[in-house]
Image (tube, grey):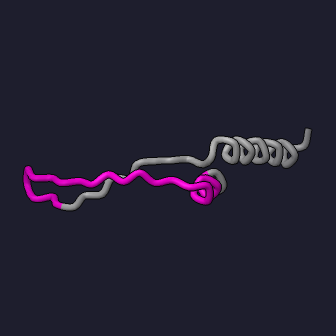
Amino acid sequence: MNTLTLIGIILIVLGAVVLIYGGITYTSKKDIVDIGDLKIQTEKQKGSLLEAIRFLCCG
């Protein structure tokens, strides 16, 4: 089997999994305050189908 054909099949399968699963969610942490021992962070859960496709394509 040709290497490009194999890569194409893998991408198609991954795309189908993302469509069936409904996207990928992830948690993003952001430092708000970082003064000495005091550290305040926020956590925001993100995710969408477009971000999932971009993640699969671009890493």
Q: Is residue 58 visible?
A: no
Which residue appears at 40% of the width and 48% of the height? Answer: 27
From the viewer's perspective, is 20 left or right of 44?
A: right
Highlighted magenta segment, given as a residue range: 33-55
From the viewer's perspective, is 30 left or right of 58?
A: left
Could you tell me residue 35's position as x and y percent?
10, 59
Which residue appears at 25% of the width and 58% of the height? Answer: 31
Is residue 36 within the magenta segment? yes
Which image quadrant: the N terminus?
Answer: top right
Q: Quadrant of residue 6?
A: top right
From the viewer's perspective, is 13 left or right of 51?
A: right
Q: Is 26 rendered above or below residue 35?
A: above
Q: Quadrant of residue 2?
A: top right
Could you tell me residue 15's position as x and y percent?
72, 48
Which residue appears at 82% of the width and 43% of the height? Answer: 9
Q: Main secondary structure of the magenta part?
A: strand
